[in-house]
Image: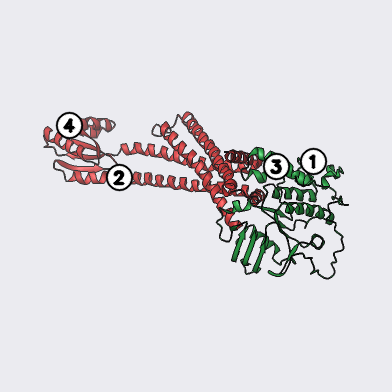
Amino acid sequence: MIKLENVTKVYPGGTVAVKDVNFEVAKGEFVFLVGASGSGKSTLIRLMMREEPPTNGEIWIAGKHVTAMPSSKIPYLRRSIGTVFQDFKLLPTKTAYENVAFAMEVTGKNRSVIRNQVPQVLKLVGLSDKAERLPRQLSGGEQQRVAVARAFVNRPLILLADEPTGNLDPATSVGIMRILDRINRTGTTVVMATHDHAIVDAMQRRVVELDRGRISRDESRGIYESRPVGTAATEEVDLSEEPAAEQEPESVDASNSSSDDSSDSPEDIE
Amino acid sequence: MTNLKYMIKEAFNNLGRNALVVLGAILAVFISLTLTFGTLIFGEIVRVNTLQWAEDVRVIAFLQDDLAVEETAVLQNEVASWTEVADVSYISKSDAYDEAVILFADDDSMLSVLVDNPDLLPASLRVQPVDPADYEVIVIRLSSTPGVSEVKSAGEAIDAMIALRDGLRIMFWLLAVALGVAAIALIANTIHMAIYARREEIEIMQLVGASNWFVRTPFLIEGALEGLIGGALAVTFIVLAQQMAVDRLSQLPEWINLSIQNDFILRQGALVLLFGVVAGLVGSSLSLAVHRTLRS
């Protein structure tokens, strides 16, 4: 599904972000990219979504050779990739529903398809009852769920996530991880860059560690072992499907303090 | 089809959303096109008026006294057949005498000389050039024509007039071109601001796989609309201003003519509108190109 061959990325000015990286991700895999800040995780994600071309090496995404892809073809590549970022990247003037629908509108989807799909995906991420809220009326965790819904609504083959829990507290992060896990179980390949020890350790998935632009470790069921001294990951993370003691943080908007917990336990797919 | 509808809707939404920026762009187009169109109109007024001067340019060929009537007619026909000559009129000795009597009505000594010698003044051909700039060619040709005794023209005055006319023409064209370029730059800048204000939205559109045209077309439509509205305002403004000028300044000296052919206004107005739309499209394309190079 994803294949990188001898990929090197040098930024103008000579910064080597990624050096001679080789790795392959099979269809339906869930891969964590870990490593210190500046180790090249985000660059790899950007290379895979063809936000920028590699300086050297070859990249295949979803069967397409993207290394020398002309810019006119990139939008079509993007339609088979869902992306989630640390800062959510939601349109502030559109409601949760409209943000998700936007991803379908820009690809020219039929209106009836949009009307059918968007509520389904919002239900998947547990935001059915907040569809008409604007991003600023949602908590961080809820905004990220909207972003995940938007990334998934076109049923991408691949979901790329760059620090999706970076702005969220541990409990909220668990909620996001559950959704990503569920999406992965529908067959979507997930690659997630993170430095969240607790999540990586709890998920027990493939871990690819980057160290100064090179792959230093690749384990099929790994943990985030290279902990910097002094930061012990003490949080116990429960990713089981039973109703957990998961708590959403207080909403940013005071009017949104209604404690309806239904949205915090997203329903299953289908 | 849905796409096109969506894009037009987007373009109009943007016009509303960035009302202040859009207003700025329309005003910029309006002002620069008003200046451009105004310059064109003023240039046309100057052209029409200098055309009248040109009609007054004459080369006078005095004829030898011994020329027979038939010879004079042959000579007149010959000169009239020259390509650089627009018109030839014959002034006989008696015509010249009548003119002189009127001209020197206040000068008794001159009058007495004229009355005593009614044959004193020679007959002449008054030659009007097609293009005033050709007067020198006519002077040279007439000088070497048998039967012509002397050739006169207001050479320096004509030269000055031609220089002024050509200078004005070039000045107006340069002004119009400079103002047109300014209009494009202003539209480009405004669209650039609109794109900058929406860079997050554009980034997100690109993230979710919107095609390049899907992202760009609303901006192109927006630019074209701003150019069209600004151009329409400019044309309306100038046409009204010109009509007001004609109405209000009716007591101007006769030799100044402010009225302009309607078909000139229609043609130039349509051109200005077209220019507005093209400036809008070029402006938004320019800023899109700049935006793209900034991103990559």
What is the C-alpha distance between the residues marked 1 and 3? 15 Å
Q: Can you see residue A16?
A: no
Q: Mark 3 and 4 residues: CB-CB less than 8 Å, in contact? A: no
What residue would you read off at disc 1?
A129
Q: Are marks 2 and 3 on the same chain?
A: no
Q: Which mark is drawn over residue B30?
A: none
A16 to A154, vertically: above or below: below
Q: Nearer the viewer, residue B139 or A35?
A: A35
Chain holding disc 4? B
> Disc number at residue B118?
4
- Kind of residue at disc 1: Asp
Residue A117, labelled with which disc? 3
Which quadrant: the C terminus of chain A?
Answer: top right
Distance between the alpha carbons at the discs numbered 2 and 1: 84 Å
Give amino acid for label 4: Pro
Instruction: Find numbered disc 4 in the image and state the secondary structure of the residue it sits on.
Output: loop
Going from N to C along the chain, the mark reached first, 1 or 3, is 3
Q: Judging from the image, what secondary structure is the residue with disc 3 in? A: helix
Residue in the picture at 54% in, 36% down: B233
Residue lying farthest to the right in this orientation: A245
Q: Is residue A24 above or below residue B30?
A: below
The tint chain B carries is red
Which chain, by letter, is green? A
